[in-house]
Image (spheres, helix red, strand yellow):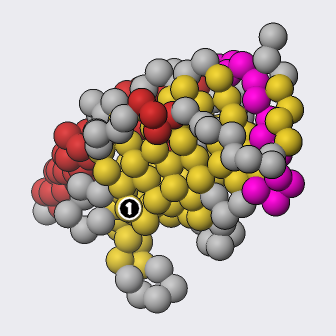
Amino acid sequence: MKKIFIFVVLCLIATQKVWTQYDKTEVFNKIKKKYANSTAVSINFCDAKHTSACYFLQAKKGNKFNLKSGNRRIVCDGKTLWNYSITNKNVVISDFEEGVASFTLDYFFFEIFPNLIPTSFKSELSSSKKKSYVLSLRCENQNTGVNTVNLSLTPDFTDIKELELVGDMGTQSWIIKKIKVNPKLDNSTFNFKVPEKVEVIDYRL
């Protein structure tokens, strides 16, 4: 009888491991269908730690992005970077250098996402007793500067509600308010026209 019990327990453990592996892979495959082959994104998002800090990002592969916040706008056409401060009434122009510009979410979708491997999947209850589904992943490319990623997902596992990145720059968490994958973005989106009566600081070589 004892041997039968041990055998049943071992079978249940083995079955649980199989389903755990299946679940995280299945969920990641759903997410990949939407995001893996993205070449352009349009995202409304906020800093999870400072929810009043919200942004609107439009981006294309090739280091083209247009990032807007309350009093700042950062635009890059792949070669030139414009950093416009409405408060200071100035715009700093420089040559774009890959790896130097501050992290934006386009980097996650274009560079990090293709290198992710799922490690676990679980459901959690928040303080408001709402169920959250969290997919944890490991980044195989060490050059991205990101080690692990945690994605909080919608109940159908097709949309990202929040993402957490852990790596060389510490931990960064973002709440995704709205996202469009592969929207039509004209190249003029990534060119900045300097407003009148604004100081221009040009650091280009």
- Foreground pick, 26 / 36: 36
Image quarter hosting the N terminus: bottom left
In magenta, the rendered stretch is 86-98
What amino acid type is highlighted by mark number 1?
Lys
- Residue drawn at x 31%, y 34% as measured from the top left: 38
Classify residue 180 as left or right of residue 16: right
Residue 11 appears in the rendering: yes
Q: Secondary structure at mark 1?
A: strand
* Residue highlighted by disc 1: 178
> Residue 50 appears in which quarter of the rendering?
bottom right
- Residue drawn at x 54%, y 42% as measured from the top left: 66
Classify residue 88 as left or right of residue 175: right
**Which percent across, then down, holds residue 28?**
27, 44
Outermost residue to the top: 205
Image quarter hosting the C terminus: top right
Relative to 179, say whether 64 is above or below.
above
**Which percent across, then down, holds residue 100?**
73, 25
- Residue drawn at x 46%, y 44% as measured from the top left: 58
**Which percent across, then down, holds residue 113?**
41, 34
